[in-house]
Amino acid sequence: MSHLDQRPPAARLLGREIVRIDPDGVAHLRFLAQPEFVNRHGTVQGGFLSAMLDSATMTPLLAQLPEDRVAVTAKLEVEFLRPAPLGPFTARAWLMTKDDRVATTRGELSDPSGTVVAAATATLRILPRKR
């Protein structure tokens, strides 16, 4: 799980915390939307929600990749379902398909009441880790 131990600056900005990865591979994460994330409507701007989902959908794949592999997002299709209030979010993400070169994952982002505010499907490219 050393892939997941690293918290790059973007993950810190999003307040990302990996809560757990279930035995079936479902990843559970937390994020914290900062006041700077709010748009003119008083809700979290969609780009920040997309960034949270990008991070979340990568997690179940990274949890099972060998140390000599890394993954990058090739495509992220986000669905904005409800206005997202400022504050904490939880995410759940799981692997849908995977071969040696490509994986597809799905994730949902929920507000504190448990309402899913956004969801995404990601296509991830699996590559050799650069030394």
Image (cartoon, rainbow, N blue to C red):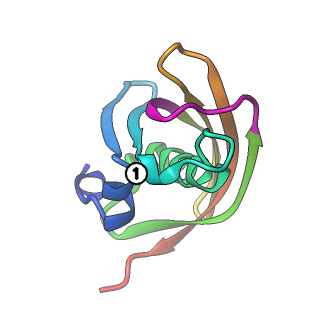
Residue at 45%, 25% (x, y): give it: 24
The location of residue 21, given as percent across then percent down, is 36, 31
Q: In the rendered view, would you say 57 is above or below 113?
A: below
Element marked by disc 1:
loop
Q: Nearer the viewer, residue 36 or 50?
A: 36
Badge 1 crowding class, 10 Å Cα cut-off, few under 14, some 14 to 19, many 20 or more, is: some
Q: Which residue is mark 1?
A: 14
Quarter of the image for the C terminus: give it. bottom left
* Magenta stretch encompasses residue 81: yes
* Residue 41 as seen in the image, left or right of residue 51: right
Q: Which residues are magenta?
A: 80-92
Corner quadrant of residue 80: top right
Residue at 52%, 13% (x, y): give it: 113
The location of residue 83, given as percent across then percent down, is 69, 32
Q: How many marks?
A: 1
* Residue 54 as seen in the image, left or right of residue 11: right
In the rendered structure, which amino acid carries the disc numbered 1? Leu
Q: In the rendered view, would you say 24 is above or below 61?
A: above
Residue at 61%, 17% (x, y): give it: 115
Q: In the rendered view, would you say 38 is above or below 101?
A: above
Residue at 46%, 31% (x, y): give it: 89
* Residue 64 as seen in the image, left or right of residue 114: left
The location of residue 99, given as percent across then percent down, is 62, 55
Q: Nearer the viewer, residue 121 or 42?
A: 42
The location of residue 84, given as percent across then percent down, is 61, 33
* Magenta stretch encompasses residue 55: no
Q: In the rendered view, would you say 67 is above or below 52?
A: below
